[in-house]
Each structure stands twice: as structure tokens, then as C-alpha cells.
Image (cartoon, rainbow, N blue to C red):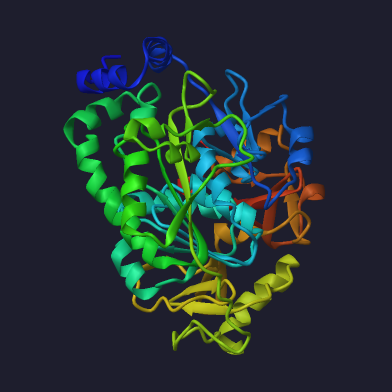
Amino acid sequence: MRLPQEFVERMRNLMDEQEYNSFMQAIKAKIQIHSLRVNTLKIKVEEFLRIFPHPLEQVPWCKQGFYLPKGFKASKHPYYYAGLYYLQDPSAMLPGTVLTPHPGEKVLDLCAAPGGKSTQIAAAMEGRGVLVLNDINTKRIKALVKNVENFGVRNAVITNNNPEDLAALYPGYFDRVLVDAPCSGEGMFRREARLITAWRRNFHPSCCVPLQRSLLEAAARMVAPGGRLVYSTCTFSPEENEGQVQSFLERHPDFQLLALSGVDGVSPGRGEWIGDPRFAQTGRIWPHLSRGEGQFAAVMARQGEIERKGDGESTRRGFPYSAPDQRELAPFLAFCSEVGIDPPSGGLYRSGEELYLLPGDLPDLSRLKVIRYGLLLGALKPGRFQPAQAFALALGRGEAERRLELPSDSPELLRYLRGETLLLGEETLPEKGWILVTTDGFPLGWAKRLGGLIKNHYPAAWRLL
């Protein structure tokens, strides 16, 4: 690995000789650290540790995060397809941890794709409140949608808009805002060598600082009084980290830097690099000090008290959330009855053919480019309902009466995940019609019995290769 000379010289000047040598040895090491984060929307951590096929060691700064054993292909295991965990670099779990989202809050992930931190926030919110996930990159939105749906998230809205447009619509609206900013990516050099080339071409720190500043400006406008703003990067440069936060606080005296407290395994920020010891209250993860890649996080609180709207007040402002009438919903209700599912409680909304379950107290989205309005239940087609994969993954264990249970170690399960038609013995087949396929009780997707066959409706983009 040939590191950029400018990067090497900068780190040599910032560190003493002993630290620099340890750091460079770690950054050049051919080490691959793999970890997962348990999806507590679907399973408790204690139960997951009982059923997972290997013993796991906890990530110090994330109670739901665990290091994976070397050689275990976690992306091929059925529990991955059931959404029981998310594969994520351990350091990337820090921003979601220090954001400390709570159930019932209004939370924004401003640069959300591909969704690792978004799913961590969603799990902490326990399906209550409004979670807005935005990303300006249209190409990355697909990965965000899939990861959120695989996690079974019910209360997320996914948007594809400029941060300035969001800020104009939602001033002082969100209790928590995360800005996991695009950066020079120096903390990931040993994991992804392509980032070294990108650093030289168009992700040099000098190119990233103005973009990060504009993201923070938009985010600050949307934080409610008493709310929390978390800024994070996966780089080492002080101008993108402590220096960026210092500049922000100088422009925004209504925000206060909070110390990262109660987070194990995280080193203090390097306030001395910018001449201000206060910025030791930020946090860094170093590859030579922790089992993870490079990460920075700062927590800032807006002064004031959070204002809660009364029950009679609405933030919808005329957006057409009216539910479809009973005639339109008839195919959906018939489907629920057929599979043995209680129709979900809450607001239903139809956008074209798509039927959504909306988060409670959803804000006005009429002037935004919306990718998902909430949980996509399926498509209302003439005389029938086509269930969505997201609906299957959002169901709990035992929630559907008509199920086809395939053990996690069965060849039939692998065939289902590959999208193949299943031919099973008559004694094992449910009644004809739609079926929820499960493994060890956890939903995987839909299928349909046609005679003696199980027609596979597992999405092509999700299949095991």
C-alpha cells in the first residue's frame, strides 16, 4: 500500500515519533476486522447470542455490536437474510451510539446511504417516532432502501433531496440530527485501497471541508431547541474533524459541545492539534489503539428546551394523507385474512399502486422527492394485492398464521433464497395461496402455493448468489 506522501508527512508532524510509528504500522497492516450489529427490532441481544453459531466478542462502544470470527461468511447465513443483524465496521457504530435516539422522537439522518447508521438509529427508536433518512446521491438510495427494509423498519421516511431544501421546510423540527459527512476517508485506507486513489483525485481534505461546512449549516437549522447534533467522519485530518467543529461553534454560539461520556474504547479528540484543549471532548477511534478503522465524532446540543406540540396540533399542513376507502383496500384486507395477519394499525396511504403504513405525526412531504413514505406494504392492483418484501420483513415471529417454516440448515431454505421453485411433500404444504416463508420462526419473504408447488416470490435483487 503506497500512502499519499502529503498524508504521511502531515501525520508525522502531528504525532510524536512513538505514536507515529505505531499508527503507521497499524494503517499499513493487512488486517480485516469484521463485525455485526444485532437488530433489536427483531431479537434481543441475549437471544441472538444463544442462537448464533459462533461465540462473539462485544464491540466496546456499542452494546449491540460484536466482532465476527475470522473466516465466517456472515453475509451467506440465513439470519442475515432474515435481517437479524447488519454487517458494519465496528468504528462506524460510534456515531449512532452517541446520537442516543429515543422512541417517539423526530430524528434525521442527513447523509444516510447505505443505511448502517440509519438502521442503528431505527433500532434504538423501537418503531416509534419519525425517522427521516435522506441522501442526495440517487445511486446510493437503492442500498439504503434495501437495508432499511431488510431491518424491518416501520417508521422511516426515505428522501432524496438537497440538505438546503430540507432545512427550508423543517427549521427547528428534529430532536436529533446526524451528519455523517462525506470525507477524505483516511480512516478506511487499509480497508479500501481505492480510497487512496480517490484522496489524490477528488477527496482531498481541502475539497471535503467546504462540503462538510455546508452540510453542518443545513443541519443546524433543523435541530430543535434542546436537540442534539452529531457530526462524524471516517478520516484523521484535523481540518475535517476538530477544526470543522471549532469553526461551526464559532458561527453558532447557540450550540454547545458535549463530552463523549460513558463510551468505552474511544480516545479523546486531539484539541491540541487546533490549539484548543476543549476539543478533547470529541471522540476518535484509532486503528493502533482499538479494533476498528479510523472514526471521529462530536456531539453538540442546541440551547433551549425542546418544544412538544399538543395533541391538537399537526405538522402535516394539508398533505393528502387520507386513507384509501374500503373498496380500494378490499384486496389488501383479503390478503391479510388469507395469510392470517391482523391489518396493521395506523395511517394507510396510497401513492399510485403502492400502499404504505405511515409513521405517526408524519410531517408535510409534499415538496420533497420521497422514495419511501413509511413501510411499503405492497401494490394495490385491479382485484388483487401484491405484498412487498418490506412487509414480510417487518412482521414479527408468529405474526402470520399461514407460514412455511424452513430450518436454517435445510437445503430447501438455500433454494428459496436463490429464488427457486420448491417442490415439497403434501404433508408439509400449507393451504393454497399466499405464504410467509420463515426460518427458525423469523420471516424471510413471500411465496405462493400453486397445486403441489411453492412459487417463489423472493426478490431477484435480494437473492443468495
Q: Is residue 312 left or right of residue 44?
A: left
> Looking at the image, how many numbered discs can be counted on the residues?
0
Residue 313 lies, in percent from the top left, at: 56, 87
Q: Is residue 32 left or right of residue 220?
A: right
Q: Is residue 312 above or below residue 450?
A: below
Q: Residue at x 69, y 71 (%)?
A: 336
Q: Quadrant of residue 223?
A: bottom left
Residue 59 lies, in percent from the top left, at: 62, 31
Quadrant, the N terminus:
top left
Q: Residue at x 37, y 40 (%)?
A: 242
Q: Quadrant of residue 416?
A: top right
Does any portion of residue 301 appear in the rendered image? yes
Return the residue found at the far left.
201
Residue 415 lies, in percent from the top left, at: 60, 38
Q: Residue at x 58, y 77 (%)?
A: 308
Does any portion of residue 185 appear in the rendered image? no
Question: In the depicted view, which residue is nearer to us: 266 or 59?
Answer: 266
Q: Is residue 24 left or right of residue 347?
A: left
Question: In the depicted view, which residue is nearer to us: 373 or 93?
Answer: 93
Q: Residue at x 34, y 77 (%)?
A: 367
Q: Is residue 426 left or right of residue 310?
A: right
Q: Is residue 127 above or below residue 142?
A: below
Residue 215 lies, in percent from the top left, at: 32, 55
Question: In the depicted view, which residue is nearer to us: 89 or 409?
Answer: 89
Q: Is residue 47 above or below residue 380?
A: above
